[in-house]
Image (cartoon, rainbow, N blue to C red):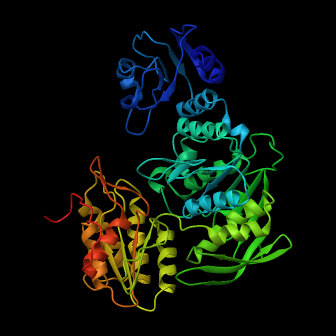
Amino acid sequence: MPEIKKQLLSCLEDMRDWVLNVPQDTEISGIAWDSRKIKPGDVFFALVGESFDGHQFVTTAVERGAVAVIGTRQPAPLKVPYVQIRGDDRVGLAKFAAAFYDHPSKDLVVIGITGTDGKTTTTNLVYHILKTAGFPVGMISTVNAVVGEKTLDTGFHVTTPESPDIQRYLRMMVEAGLTHVVLETTSHGLAQKRVEEVDFDLAAVTNVTHEHLDYHGNYQGYLEAKSLLFKALSREEQKHGIEKLAVLNRDDESYAYLSEHTRAKQISYSLSNEADIWADNIMYTSNELNFTCRGAGKSFPIQTSLIGRYNVHNCLAATGLTLLGLNIPVEVVQEALRTVETVPGRMEQVDMGQDFLAIVDFAHTPNAIRQALLAARELTYGKLIAVFGSAGLRDVEKRKLMPEIAVEIADLTILTAEDPRTESLDSILSDMAEGAVKGGGKEGKDFWLEPDRGTAIRKAVNQARTGDLVIVCGKGHEQSMCFGHNEYPWDDRIALQAALAEHLSKPGPQMPILPTSPG
């Protein structure tokens, strides 16, 4: 176990104000920032958040076994060591976590992927390409962490894990003999310094569109948070013989800004030939996507089971990172994209034997809704029926934009619950209805409001006829729905299977129960 004096007075030297009660023999076994999850031997970081102050729980943390405390305020008298630091407490947490786990990212080739939409898919694509190439590779996504043969859950709702968890996963990878890791990096993860002490080698952006403006204030603030990943490419010297590389989307609004905010080598990708790597001859069906990839003096066909035109951008980003960034052979990239499995909850088809298509997708932003519905529209000659909601305590503006987009593309739209949290579901649905009306929709004709998500999915299924397409958006792979402060078990894929089974009068799973469920 590391001595606490060494950890605190070394890795936090430039942030330390003063230290209280630091004996030479204090040992720590873990790091905690939630007093409810303290384990004996942990050091407790008293973080100050938007709605909480960890200093209020210092005494509780010590009572539960914390052997040291780190905070930014003067503490009440304690019997355990306390270090007061200045500046950003999350930077302190990241520094401490990296030091505690002996800076594992320095022993790995680290590939960061950020963006509003498509980053989980792109993360999985890069992981699969590297695995196909024979590299010992790990992955940390907003779905899970994969360390060798182990798959670890990263939480209820999608975001980059906190810095101690990231550093712990990276250390596990090093000890497992892995050499590469693909790290999905959210704007919250960047802004909250969760990846502050990760030594990135390559990074890519999918796109930067309307999302999280409730947190970042405006689009510029959101863009600046994303740019932190590309600025990080300049922080460390080259390692493992890998040249630092930024892979940017030339078709996206973010391109001009991000291209000016990194000193690393850059390559761009696009659907036009103005980029370093681009695609043409794009064709897709309900089962596959085909296009020709061109650039760097090469031209080769790509075929993948991923569907939707927007996945061309994801494939190009992954190809740029691996083919151009890591010199993976063309035939390996082709084989990997051909054999990659559908990412859970991303344009995932649900087939119970019905005579229409049924799809679950994670789309929960205006751009993602547009792209998912446009992709779905290309897959059906019948009606397109969409089901989605908008999360409570999140960006209010997008809850109006998404229905406005949906009624323009879909034939029928059913607006429903999606993690209302402590906000009024009726108020959320009212905002969404306002957006639908603005888009030209008429309630009862083009769109409906249905508070219960299970009932909404049933209505969509029951309105579908031969050749139609039902798409349920917003939750994707997620396994719970938040009402108030409670998480209720929920999986859109199971709910859609249940509705289809009922519709077909055949055995199937039971519809999950929510507080809004009838009866």
Whether residue 342 appears in this view of the structure is: yes
Residue that extends furthest to the left in the rendered view of this protein: 519
Residue 313 visible, this orientation: no
Left or right of 133, for residue 241: right
Q: Looking at the image, which residue sits at the far right?
A: 297
Image position of 90 with respect to 481: above or below? above
Left or right position of 372 against 281? left
Q: Residue at x 44, y 83 (%)?
A: 409
In the depicted structure, whether residue 225 falls above or below residue 124: above
Quarter of the figure with the C terminus: bottom left
- In this rendering, is residue 155 above or below 379? above
Along the viewing direction, whichever of 134 and 118 lies nearer the viewer:
134
Q: In the image, residue 149 lies at what x, y percent?
A: 57, 49
Q: Position of 107 compared to 55: left or right?
A: right
> Which residue is depicted at the point 65% across and 20% down?
13
- Residue 156 percent location from the top left of the image: 40, 50
Residue under the image location 55 percent in, 76 percent down = 307
Q: Quadrant of residue 404?
A: bottom left
Q: Position of residue 155 (x, y in %)?
A: 44, 47
Q: Does residue 391 sit above or below 39 in this rendering?
A: below
In which quadrant of the rendered view does residue 324 lie? bottom right
Name the quadrant of the N terminus.
top right
Q: Which residue is pictured at 56% across the width and 24% down the height?
A: 86
Relative to the observer, which residue lies in front, 431 or 466?
466
